[in-house]
Amino acid sequence: PSPTPGFALPTKHTQQAVDPASDFTSKWTRADAKQIMAQSNPSVAPGQNSMSPDVTMPEIPEDFPAMNDDVWVWDTWSLTDENANQISYKGYDVIFSLVADRHAGYGFDQRHWNARIGYFFRKTNADPAKDKWNYGGHLFLDNTSIGNTEWSGSTRLMQGNQVNVFYTATTFHDVAERNAGGGGIAPDAAIAKALGKIHADKNGVTFDGFQHTKLLEPDGKLYQNKAQNPGFAFRDPYTFADPAHPGKTYMVFEGNTAGNRGDYQCKGEDLGYQPGDPHAESLTDVQNTGSHYQTANVGLAVADNKDLTKWSFLPPILSANCVNDQTERPQIFIQNENGKNKYYLYTISHQFTYADGMRGPDGVYGFVGDGIRSDYQPVNNSGLALGSPTDLNLPANNPSGSISGQQNGRQFQAYSHYVQPNGLVQSFIDNVNGVRGGSLSPTVKINFKNGVTQVDRSFGQNGLGPFGYLPTNKRIGGEGLY
Ligand code: FRU
């Protein structure tokens, strides 16, 4: 990469793979993430989008439709197999979403404290532009899941009509925390799964028979736990098979670097500057600005049995120490490039979780390597794959806080991007020019190859596809379409 005046060069990453069980953790460095600003336009009129159109999500219209009038809908995923194929089951497409009651008296920003997993279905041959997703209700019966709040995960079709729902079991203990959205006793978090059955007939799709098993709690050694930091993150399991390690099932999830909050010391490898780079920051300066409080990682675990009820932690595959505090909803996407499997790790992050001195948008970030555990190269050299339109020259905002009047009104238009086969990226609408969302965004398409990603503006209308477009690419079961 050619140097941008005033910016340090990004870190060199080999993309080389090592044994998934080894303890090498790839670093998303400050030198890498600083490329977001190096590639941003410093002189746009305040409040415009300063990012390249290649990494900017097209603008969502303010008059977007609500997908459902009774529940807010946010983090969403499809019924998949172990290779990230999206499964049409007996002629139906099925998706799973975090949902919260729109009429229960709390606001949109309180949804996290009241989250349940809901599901929607529609016929596989439906017209995605016209036919609505049918809401099937909550996936689990009341008071049956591990924990009292259900956060994100993934759902896999197993043998026959068995499904495994991997999810985050969050437990709030405190009304202040739950209803006021913070300030009370911190919640517990575990990764859990529920094995149940899917049924489909002419009336639609139903689920039953869920058996819940707690799978993992943070150990405080590889993954930070609540005793070490009440604000720890441990969530969003996504399981997959790796053709390079047949017979094994892996899980990626969102974690934080273990250790007591504030104890982390930023290291040279977190900064990642090349020796002698005149624009490198010093470790002391970075540490003194409090950047050591930002300790996101992408965790890895491996299943110890075929039933996927027992799991062991492996060291994180990626850390963002001293760069960012949250790498959420990670997923691994394997794509053949020039006869070789390339592993794309996608994860979502926020503008307000960046460390001091760092700036980037709400959106999805990508990393490419030769295996699950490799020296990941951030896509576009920076890591940013797709962000909401933002003027990165202005300071960061928080979607539930007060927003600077000058900032682009679409900086929080969408979040929780989920990359599907063929580069289709689905997300939910959060805030479009002050109009709050709670419904799925128009799906957009990114093309990615050789570590470079680009929004496909020829897809849909100026890059915006149908709202909530999560098509299936593999058909299982049934004699035909119902
Ligand atoms: C992403 C996220 C997930 C979490 C969920 C809670 O939008 O923060 O990490 O599971 O939302 O609502």
Image (cartoon, helix red, strand yellow):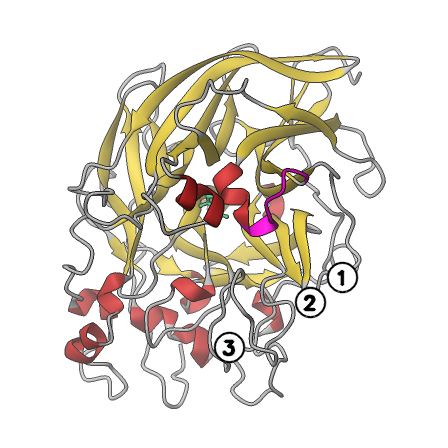
Q: Residue at x 63, y 80 (%)?
A: 48
Q: Secondary structure at mark 3?
A: loop
On whether ligand 1 comes within 8 Å of the CB at mark 3, the answer is no
Disc 2 target residue: 433
Is residue 107 within the magenta segment? yes
Q: Is residue 211 above or below residue 228?
A: above
Q: State which tag comes first along the sequence, 1 or 3.
A: 1
Q: CA distance from mark 1 to mark 2?
A: 7 Å
Of the 4 image quadrants, the one containing the N terminus is bottom left
Disc 1 target residue: 62
Mark 2 surroundings: few (<14), some (14-19) or many (≥20) residues within 10 A:
some
Residue 289, position as x, y percentages in the image: 24, 76
Disc 3 target residue: 392
Q: CA distance from mark 2 to mark 3?
A: 17 Å
Of the 4 image quadrants, the one containing the C terminus is top right
Say whether residue 341 is visible.
Answer: no
The span shown in magenta is 103-109
Q: Secondary structure at mark 2?
A: loop
Three-letter amino acid code of the residue under disc 2: Asn
Query: In front here: 165 or 73?
Result: 73
Q: Are marks 1 and 2 in contact (CB under 8 Å)?
A: yes
Indicate left or right for 451 with 472 as reference. Answer: left
Three-letter amino acid code of the residue under disc 1: Glu
Indicate left or right for 54 with 290 as reference. Answer: right
Residue 78, located in which quarter of the rendered image? Answer: top right
Query: In front here: 262 or 3?
Result: 262
Residue 268, position as x, y percentages in the image: 17, 69
